[in-house]
Image (spheres, rainbow, N blue to C red):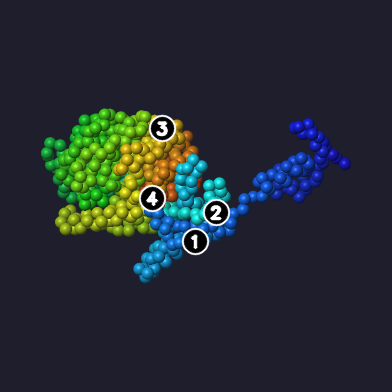
Amino acid sequence: MMTSSSIGKNGDKRTGGIAWAGSLVGSENPNNLGYRYSNPLKRYKKSTEGNGEDGQETEFPSNVVVQFQNRQGDELASPLDVPTESSVDDLQALVHSLLEDSDGEDNDDDNKNNKLKRIPYSFYAKLEKENGVIDEVEITNSLLDFLKEHQNLVSTEVTLQLTYQPLAVFKVRPVTRCTSTMPGHTEAILHVSYSPDGQHLASGGGDTTVRFWDVNTSLPKATCKQHKDHVLCTAWSPDGRYFASADKRGTLIIWDPHQRGRTNNATVEGGSKKKTPNASEPIWVKALAHKQYISSLAWEPLHLNQGRGERLVTASKDGTCKIWNVRTRQALVTLSGHTDAVEAVKWGGEGFLYTASRDRTIKVWTAKEGDVLGKLVRTLKGHGHRVNTLALSSDYVCRTGPYDFAPSGRPRQTFEQTGDDGENADAVRKAKYQAALERYQAFRDQQEGDGHQERLVSGSDDYTLFLWHPISDKHPVKRLTGHQQAVNHIQFSPDGRYFASASFDKKVKLWNGFSGDFLKTLTGHVGAVYQVAWSSDSRYLVSASKDSTAKLWVVPSGKAAKATLPGHADEVYALDWSPNGASVATGSKDRTIKIWKH
């Protein structure tokens, strides 16, 4: 008889034996060699482990009373008794049936009902934390999982308030493979951007050229060589008609990438006119638009100013911003007030301009129709170092203007212009304006609380971000800390529910787009992160880094990257996700552009 005895940590003598456990040998448990050492003390501990104070696990009721409400706080039906096992899909089905019932009297059209059923929803519960702060938590799996995770903050004896928010109807497929590599630039590529309709790709960089590419064939369409120095910023007009670029010498150039062999008068500085046979010739060159380099550009959103889409604002190192009219080719107003270089400018959906400067301030200016253009409204102070980047909750809907996309990725509405001028051109402009206005109104209706409350986030060299309600208040809503180095870039998700920040600390951080609460740190890059871009359905995020890769992340669930997009031979500076969701473009210091698809 084999026995064993040992002395425990506290000096107590442990007596036990060796028992045969042959059934656990082999493929079922390769680490077990066939013997199990019995220990009476350990056996006793295991039997009491895992029980609560009274030896019982917390039990949850089989049902819980739920009150559904939309983002504006309007209640949907009366409180309902819902099984705690209900998943997000079950809650979606319930909301669809309730919405169908509430619209039933007015709506007899089956197609509209079917469309209603296809809209996916996300669900949020408001929880009051111990410090009195009310937080909004998304339900990702089932009500039971949510109750288990937050059992200290949720009582099942009171009605649970659930806010439902519509998500994008179509799902963008995650990009995982490189479908084409596009050479051509002879220096680092600093910018890549898709047109609002997703049909054109433009790039600019250190080789002083702007290039337009065919999205379908990944071949060059036009190479534009009018710049004499690094192209520092570029932007498409929201209707997709024009493309603006600006360089290190303060020159602003407007291009029309659609012109093919038609005669067009381009006014060059000095008044001379020449014919423009193709897209590689500019329609307007403004030399010395600023005394020093131009750091940022922004077009007026299409739903403002009757949809003319002819004004843009430039920001410069000389400390000023200028508003230009592309049609009349004039500077309308100069915004001076910053005491140092202006790093970023945004034209908001509510008709205000936001400028961020190295002087540590952000200034808000009027640009609304019927108001004085360029009047200083307020100055937002709080940062302790230069402000690098700005992001607006309405950025995506303002960028894409009239273009909305069906599940196939094709635009729901096409705007075809038959002539250069005349009635058709005016009709197309009005149709685009109406579509852009409807899209912006729909976006605003989905936002939490007061839809008119545009949200601004600023990122700085002081390692922090600030969330602002710049239209109504000069004080920040929240100061967001966590990054350990300068913040490079911020971007709101298209639905405004989240925003992501990229930093030199090699991290991407995810934040709640309404409250500014920290959600997740996305770790994986081994170099500084330069830029982030969202898919148009707000389900995926892609980031570009100094480590020569881009990474794809699932939002809001995944901490680890869903995919790494390798292939570039040097740092990835530029990044954009097509508005139709079909592809991602990355531009690198290795002088190539890569296109990534599913």
In the image, what residue occupies the spot 39% across and 57% down? 74
Q: Nearer the viewer, mark 4 or mark 3?
A: 4
Sequence-first disc among 4 and 2? 2
Using the numbered discs, state the Cα–Cα distance from disc 1 to disc 4 in whole angstroms.
Answer: 23 Å
For the residue carrying disc 1, how many other residues have a C-alpha within 10 Å: few (<14), some (14-19), or many (20+)?
some
Dot 2, crowdedness within 10 Å: few (<14), some or many (≥20)? some
| Residue highlighted by disc 2 | 156
Point out residue 433 in the picture as x, y percentages from the top left corner: 24, 54
Q: Which residue is mark 3?
A: 463
Say what amino acid the circle numbered 3 marks. Answer: Tyr
- Percent of width and height locating residue 595: 39, 45
Label 4 and label 3: CA atoms lie apart by 28 Å
- Residue occupied by mark 1: 80
Q: Earlier in the sequence, mark 1 or mark 4?
A: 1
Q: Which three-letter amino acid code belongs to the residue tagged 1?
A: Leu
Quadrant of the rendered image containing residue 319: top left
Q: What number is the disc on residue 448?
A: 4
Where is 222 relative to 59, above or below?
A: above
Element under disc 1 = strand
Q: Is residue 186 left or right of residue 419?
A: right
Q: Residue at x 44, y 54 (%)?
A: 163
Q: Secondary structure at mark 2?
A: loop
